[in-house]
Image: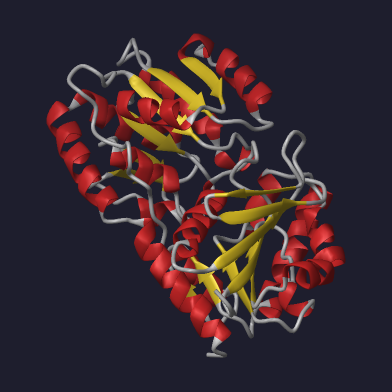
Amino acid sequence: MSGRRVLWINWRDLRNPLAGGAEVHADEVMKRLAKKGWEFVLASHAVPGLPARETENGYTVRREGGKDTFNFTVYLRLRRWIREERPDLIVDDSNKIAFAVPWLTNKPVVALIHHLFGDAIFREASFPAAMYVKLSESLVPRIYRDVPVMTGSPSAQTEMRSFGIRDVVDVGEGVDLEGYSPPTAGERDPNLLLYLGRIKKYKGLDVLIQTVSLLKDRFPDVRLEVAGSGDDVPRLKEVAASLGVAERVKFLGRVSEEDKISLYRRSMVALNSSLKEGWGLTSIEANGCGTPVVASDVPGLCDSVQDGKTGFLVPFGDAEAMADRVGRILGDPVLAARLQEQSLEWARSHTWDKVAERTESVLSGALAGK
């Protein structure tokens, strides 16, 4: 439809092997708005084995540039993309490094920033790389001060405003619960813990392995399955071996959507030990299968987990606190049943339709100059 053509820029697309919650968010919104007449072209970095251009879920994906230098691709090629795609609006979906689109074009721009890393980046990257990210984030208030900024949670909205960004809209986060349901009788494993997500240092998976070590005497059959990919796997395997729980911690690699749902349904508790998240999509996905979550009490996760209702929040890095809360759930069937029921109710209150509607309102306002 004329007047509603959007160039959406994100580091990755949904088919990228490293795709995560930000890519799910973009896909869920674009495919819904595409059905309402919006036209989207998603620009993301090139991936070996994937075409340079293809159409999926009602929108077009074009892939150019390297996975570690995609921001420079944006700086150098944005004008060409605009000339070729003829967008009416650009969504600057920044992740770690600001694309600075408002400084590169006079086109209407809306930013989508799920969260800022802050000092957390120093746990993940080398010092020079971390300083580069830190410097980029320090420019965020200046880059986006005159454009609408969307984010996905109340804590992220508060954080953005504290950085000096004025126009911040919490469009929320959703979950597609098609196929998600509580397990059948006997399907849930009373000793299985689950982590699902990227395997990076800032995710703090050391804490989860320590949690298994702390619980193994009380719960002799307790196990942890880790689903996802990332460069921290070798180190974490060494941690598990050093704590004597290597046989209890299984690294599954990247799993299919079908296997992911099966893992949620089989697990007694889902865990998230991250230092920081924009929201915590996996928390809601787990809840969609009636699985409670124990997570770090940090921005993003404190919005997706209702402490004492859909699971528990614990201080970041506190393995003893995490083991205590997990132990309560494993050892108390009445508590577990209550958390499972409340988790289902919470998950059903988050829909991508609502997120798409709020996003459409922001995009329409930007096109109208509001």
Q: Nearer the viewer, residue 81 or 190?
A: 81
Q: Nearer the viewer, residue 67 or 190?
A: 67
Q: Nearer the viewer, residue 251 or 12?
A: 12
Query: Looking at this rendering, what residue extends furthest in the bottom direction?
Result: 369
Query: Looking at this rendering, what residue extends furthest in the left direction?
Result: 334
> In the rendered image of this protein, does residue 315 appear above or below residue 36?
above
Quadrant the N terminus occupies: bottom right
230 vs 81, left or right, is: left
Query: Looking at this rendering, what residue extends furthest in the right direction?
Result: 76
- Number of residue marks: 0
Colour scheme used in the picture?
A: secondary structure
> In the rendered image of this protein, does residue 324 appear above or below residue 46?
above
The residue that appears at 49% across and 17% down in the rendered structure is 249
Residue 240 in view here: yes
The residue that appears at 32% across and 36% down in the rendered structure is 179
Residue 276 in view here: no
71 vs 367, left or right, is: right
Quadrant housing residue 286: top left
Q: Nearer the viewer, residue 347 or 137?
A: 347
Residue 340, horizontal then vertical, whole percent: 21, 37
Residue 265, horizontal then vertical, whole percent: 31, 28
Quadrant housing residue 354: bottom left
Residue 109, horizontal then vertical, whole percent: 64, 77
